[in-house]
Amino acid sequence: MKSKLFFLLLAVMSLTLVLACSSEEVEEVATEVEVAKESKDDHEDHSTLEEVLERGSLKCGVNDNLTGFGVLTSAGSFEGFDIDYCKAVAAAILGDASKVEYVPLTASARFEALGSEEIDLLIRNTTWTASRDRDLGNDFTATTFYDGQGMMVYADSGYKTIEDMAGATICVLQGTTTELNLDDRFKSAGLDYTPLTFETNDPLQAAFEEKRCDGWTTDKSGLASKRAEFPAAAGGPEALVVLAETLSKEPLGPLTRDNDSEFYDVVQWVVFGLIQAEESGITSSNVAAMAADPKDPGMARLLGVPYGDGKVADFSFGVDPTFIQHAIKAVGNYGEIYEKHLTPLGLTREGSLNAMWTNGGLIYAPPFR
Amino acid sequence: MDIFIDKLSKLSRSQRNRNLFYQLLFLILVGFFANYLISKAMQLELTLSHFESRSGFGISHTFLKDYTSNDSRWSAYFTGVINTIRVSLVAIILATLLGTIMGVARLSKNVLFSTIAYLYVELVRNTPLLIQIIFWQIIFLKLPRITEALTFGSTVVVSNRGILLPYAKPNEDVNSNIFVIVLLFITIISFALSYYLNKKEDIDGKKLKIQNYNINGSLAGTFVFLILSVSTYFILQRPFVLDLPSLYQNSKGTYLQSGGFEFTPEFGAILFALVIYTGTFITEIVRGSIQSLSKGQTEAAQSLGLSNYQSMTLIILPQALRSIIPPLTNQFLNLTKNSSLSVVIAYPELFMVSRTIMNNSGRALPVFFLILFTYLSLSLIISLFMNFINRRVTRIGA
Amino acid sequence: MNQQLKWAYNTFSGSFYNTLITFLSLVIFGFIASNLFGFISTSEWAVVSANKRLLLVGRLPQGEEWRAWSILWISSFLIFSSLKIFVKPSIKELIFITIIFASVCFIFITQDAIFNVIIFSTLSLSSYLFAKYISQTPYITIFRKLLAFMWLTIIPLIFLILLIEDGPKPTLWGGFLLNIILAGVAISVGFPLGLLFALGRASQLPAVKIVCTIYIETIRGAPLVGWLLLAWFVLPKFLPEFWNLNETSVVIRAMIILSAFTSAYTAEVIRGGLQSIPKGQIEAADSLNLNLFTKLTLIVLPQAIRVVIPALISTFIAVFKDTSLVFVLALTDLLQVGRIIPEQDPEFFGKALEALSVVAFLFWIVSMALSNLSTRVERSMGIGTR
């Protein structure tokens, strides 16, 4: 009985050995070819655009817990400033703003997800920095929101500037440029401080309410909304003050992978297109009318329609020339997106960097020509 | 051909030969699998050179190590590792204590006591650890704010920024390392002395006497230890001085507390959460093992007139130890790895520090493997230690 | 009356320590109970009531709820009939179960779901009564076999319901549903696997023993969060390219890792059980010339597993709660929902404790049921009485 098992296994083993020896060579050659192919791919252009068109949906990496920029609603859908840009790109490329697969990412996993092709596009309130652009293998498209890092303290602490906060305990979120900028600022001023790094906002807010830390630092947009909703039991908004100083520049925008120029261009020009739409006075309600009867050649080029007897301008983006039209129809122009998500948080555009360039801000689109 | 088959079947009749053959087969299979994995692993880019650059971020809890944001990322990483070891070690000891007490309590005759133990296990075990950590953080935040901190005559400071207790710190003018080394020697000597005295008492069968006064071996050793260490302390000119905590305001009006041994709310929260959570699992393990012993043991102990405490410590628990140790090791490893959840409340242990580094430098893969490797080493050390204990406990008996 | 006083005295006082313990216990009881009631009565629960659907099924698209409902109905039938047939709860336990059931329905009921919830409750009640009726007829043996078969095939059935007819992508499964599915798969795949590894580690063949030990120690050596992140980013590079295996969904990868993790821990627990068997048992089995398989299934395993059932169920409960760690894979499970809903709307800021307590309650119900099960199994196996 036991010998029979032995013979059976012996037979099986010899058979597999014979097969394996021949396939091992093939395997080795195959791995060599694979390695060669992969290194070649790194230098060639990856065509995410083709993949998106083939797949029929856009994989967008987003935030699921930042009020105003990206939240998960009770109905199970995503809403926010960044989310609208995902929808705009999907509408532009695929003609349908609902063909997005949202992937809610934590701050530490976002770049890895983009690099390993889990997502096509990352729109998650990410700051454009040199190291992220080059070292991490990403490409930042146009900036959608100019923010800055601020510090929020209690009004009764008497702090007016960062220099007053020598030796203080500061609450900050982990894995962000905020953490590093905080350190840079305090170190360059020669001040001591103790950082308390949290992963999410809720335990941070609890600690700040109990005065566990003297200051709370994050992007000023976040501080404004948190201050506006500070519970009355802890003193309400009047108990807090955001220091005038801006510790750093935080330009936020969408990013794609390196060496992906086709897709990168499309995303970038969708962002510019929405800005230009606001400048030209096109809104989601009048875009159809404007497309049917464009006011000037510029508008016609933007919307991808012929002006008078001319031809349709096609800049070889690889998508339908009316792609900006689809985007505007789906989410509106820059102003409408801002109004819908960020104005309710108390972030006014007038006088800030996010005003139109014609009003003294930095929102500016290169010409569509 | 016939001779060949004949020889083969003769060989295969021995169990030992067949075992060898099966093992060979198994190893070949595993070998193929490993070869496949390794060939794929070679294609990944794994380098940790970016760890040598400046870290650029601060860490709030530094123990046994001075760390500033100018140090390398390796430095930051090691600070995180030390924090992990610190909280895990303390939590393991406390959790085992709590678990054993509660495990015995579960089987107590006092209905109130056993119900409390039962409720404790059922409520705490069945809720996720993350929620418990947040809960403990909120509790600790309810301590008085620093502007109204409690100070008991400048010996202890209690506020929601931490509890500070008097401690010892090295005197800067004197070399304190010598004292530590000498102290080590003194400890070894006193231990050896008390061990020797106790053994002599056991062998001789009667108590030791000096001038008709009984000597207890352990007491003698302790006495010797105290005399020697105190005298060395003064001979070396007070290498450690008292470090009293203090609460003060700096020039800008910021309240600060410093000095002494600091027990921050973050450390407290994660410690309490881990201890109480893991304690429930240990309770169940202890209870299961005690119940798996035959009831005859307890009855025999009682018939010998042993008290509850004696029968538990001398008869029941030593026998229950056999089936406690592997699941207990599981729980210790769990605890060490659950400490990685502390990023929720700003305790900078190794997982949180590595995620910060990952985010700043973008190369996640090599950092993953580093994290895996570190936790693996920590777990291996704990496992080896517990295996050693396990072998000693299971060597005796059927 | 005298006798009862005497019993009370002996149990609660008697010695000094006993009295002290009683006093302390009362103090602790009072403190915790008063704080709990205070919290429940003075909080605002809007953050939970607005997000009931999100908590239970996560990002499941609108219009696909029928899948979740059918799974719920089938499981309620299965659970309540098994409750009667296999578990046979007492009156006290029945009351407790009804209270929990009612509170869950109360917390999670919404206007459009009233009809479905009514079906759910009537189904549960009728399956319980049906089982009670059947247990008094001779059909009970067939029914028992039917229930056992259903338990074995429930996981594939759930998958079928979720994927049939162009079902939602697995990454959209979320909320409580996701945790249950992940835990079910992890336990049903991890337990047999763990059994194999435990036997391998206890085997006499050194090669098998070493390989199994390496596997168990490696998996146990790193935190689950680390393994999950590895599964997300590294596993696709290691999976072969045929059958498109390297593009499997994140959920499937999470299931693979969770099963491997469960198997490692289960293996260790079972090893403890194997160790506690007196050596004489194995020697007797060998002297009876039982082959390996018979020896294992009839002699060794029944004794080994019996001893470590509390530890095993503890491990399963831990696995169930560890499924909440899949948030690192961008999956929206119950705990992740609980953490993000306070940020949905400015009026929900700072309401984390309310959201998390409901999440804790849901986890608690399932884990409590499992641990009660383990107590009953212990009792029926007579542990602690011999």
Image (spheres, coloured by chain):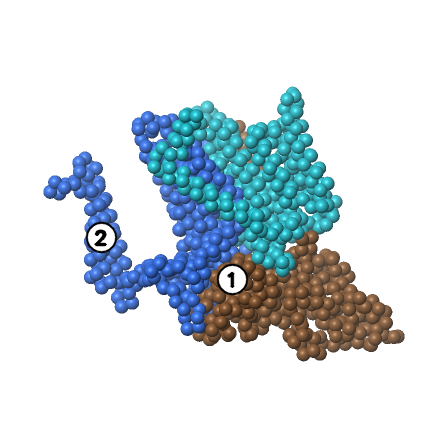
Chain colours: A brown, B blue, C cyan
In the image, residue B70 sits, relative to residue B83, either above or below, namely below
Please name the residue shown 27% across and 68% down the image: B173
Q: Quadrant of the N terminus of chain C?
A: top left
Decide: few, some or many residues near mark 2? Use Cα within 10 Å; few <14, some 14-19, many ≥20. some
- Report which residue position mark 1 lands on: A208
**Which amino acid type corresponds to the residue marked 1 in the rendered image?**
Phe
Please name the residue shown 46% across and 33% down the image: C307
**Which amino acid type corresponds to the residue marked 2 in the rendered image?**
Leu
Regarding residue A134, the answer to whether it shows in the image is no
Q: Chain of mark 2?
A: B
Is residue B153 or residue B270 the one in the foreground? B153
Element under label 2? helix
The residue most toward the right is: A309
In the image, residue B230 sits, relative to residue B19, either above or below, namely below
- Report which residue position mark 2 lands on: B226
Spatial separation of the CA atoms under disc 2 and disc 1: 47 Å
Please say if the residues under marks 2 and 1 sit with CB atoms less than 8 Å apart: no
